[in-house]
Image: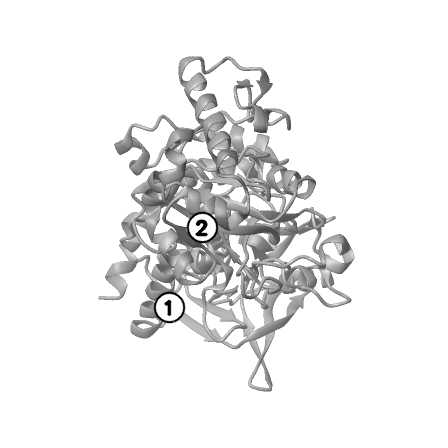
Amino acid sequence: MAAVFPANQVIVVGGGLGGMSAANQVVECGGKTVLLDKSSFCGGNSTKATSGINGAGTKTQKNKGIPDNAEIFIADTLKGGAKKPELAKVLCANSAADVDWLVEKFDLDLSLVARLGGHSQPRTHRGAERFPGMTITYALIQMLEKVAEKTDRARIITKAEVFKLIMNGNAVVGCEYRKAGAVHKEFGPVIFASGGFGADFGSDSLLAQYRPDLLHLPTTNGEHCTGDAIKMGEAIGATTTDLEWVQVHPTGLVKPDDPDAKVKFLAAEALRGVGGLVLDANGKRFANELGRRDYVTGEMWKSKPPFRLCLNKAAADEIIWHAKHYTGRGVMKFYESGAALAKDMGVPLQTLVDTHQAHYDAAKKTEKDPDGGSWPAYPSGKSWDEASGKTGSGKKFYHNVIDGSKVAAEPFYVAIITPVIHYCMGGLECTVEGECITKAGVIPGLYVAGEAAGGIHGNNRLGGNSLLDCVVFGRVSGKAAVKYTFGAGDKFRLCPTPPELKELVK
């Protein structure tokens, strides 16, 4: 412990939701923090997250009578791709308390709940308006900004590019960063929360090293996502894991007047959760819309583009803010009728009628006989849906279905979609407390949270688990790092623990 004291602050690298969760947690525990972000403003990719944040056993779910709990969520996460039960347990078991923390401490509206692909219960929380990643992350940014303005417990430094860790023996005791052409130093334990490497396209990039087959794809990631934390961690011997597992999301939005744009806006998975159907160029379904992301992407690569994500009126009405927002950005189009949609697609109207009728029939058969069907279903059991059943991952859950007779006159919101690089499951290996490790053991003074961490999600991340990962491991690492600065018996504690963050900023 003597290697790092006196350390009067926790350094957080990255101003997205992981970093903001960590920094707010440090302050909430009675510590001090400095947050460094290389962009000109905080938020990162977290502000782009469109579907929501998962929680199992939340107050919102209980109010809606949804019978969910951590055990069911853990099982779904492990089935969805996670390989380390001890990390999945932290993610899922903390989810209810951490979603409730957001609602209660930051006055957030997370009153709507949807079921995303790979989940056996509706557990992805969002508010009535705007994108949840944006509203959640901005609420935490605003709180930390107020703490920085009114107290000496927090500082936020933007345009600060951290490039090197400062060591004392095997312990991390600070970092160096560039700002305005000068090099600066900060001292204290470090929490890396600077995201993945989904925009690291250079010849020496992590993508080129681990997934050169994906370099041609567009990405949803901002240009800041170049794997800085992973590279700095590796430079001091930190172990990494799962770097080859890069998630390709099936629903990047294609802007018809700029189809080859390298950075794409993401269609929320909740669009499929509310009943959106994915059609091929011929107007036919070819996959389970609520399957794992890697599965849906794989089926798209076997099928004929362009692909369309189609929401009927009931589905669109349930997520109308999103639909209108996408339409305003030119990446979604409103059709007054199925007939107009068929004409624009260049397919017979009868094809869209038949596609919807087959989907409707499967939904009705599932209502009558949930355990029956001719096809294997995802996540388990049998399915009545032939279009997805033939892929081995038959559809089991249906929402806002319409029968074929309604299609001709039904209004639709429709987007052209394409697979995009979205999320890096791999990163710095960590303990259940977010501590980074080497082959020899824990690295004193170095922690990781969010997409910079590896091993949380295994080879495939479920929708809604990224924002949750940021909050859960941001808080976990924040608590561990601040405890580390206090030393044995809290003898280095500098500030009393505030009764509430809100109390500090009055």
State the image quarter where residue 27 is shown: bottom left
Q: Which scheme is used to colour this image of the protein?
A: one colour
View extreme (bottom): residue: 181
Mark 2 vs mark 1, foreground winner is 2
Residue 127 pos. (x, y %): 32, 49
Quadrant containing the N terminus is: bottom right
* Three-letter amino acid code of the residue under disc 1: Arg
View extreme (left): residue: 506
For the point 29% across and 37% down, which residue is it?
59
Residue 218 pos. (x, y %): 63, 59
Residue occupied by mark 2: 471
* Three-letter amino acid code of the residue under disc 2: Val
- Which residue is nearer to you in this view: 212 or 392? 392
Which of marks 1 and 2 precedes in the sequence?
1
- Which residue is nearer to you in this view: 67 or 183? 67
Residue 426 shown left or right of residue 492 in the figure:
right
State the image quarter where residue 227 is shown: bottom right
Residue 360 pos. (x, y %): 44, 26
Residue 250 shown left or right of residue 331 in the figure:
right
Res 270 visible: no
Label 2 sits on a secondary structure element that is helix
Residue 141 pos. (x, y %): 38, 64
C-alpha separation, residue under disc 2 versus residue under disc 1 = 20 Å
For the point 40% across and 31% down, which residue is it?
401
Residue 424 shown left or right of residue 402 in the figure:
right
Residue occupied by mark 1: 153
Quadrant containing the C terminus is: bottom left
Res 466 visible: yes
For the point 27% across and 53% down, which residue is it?
107
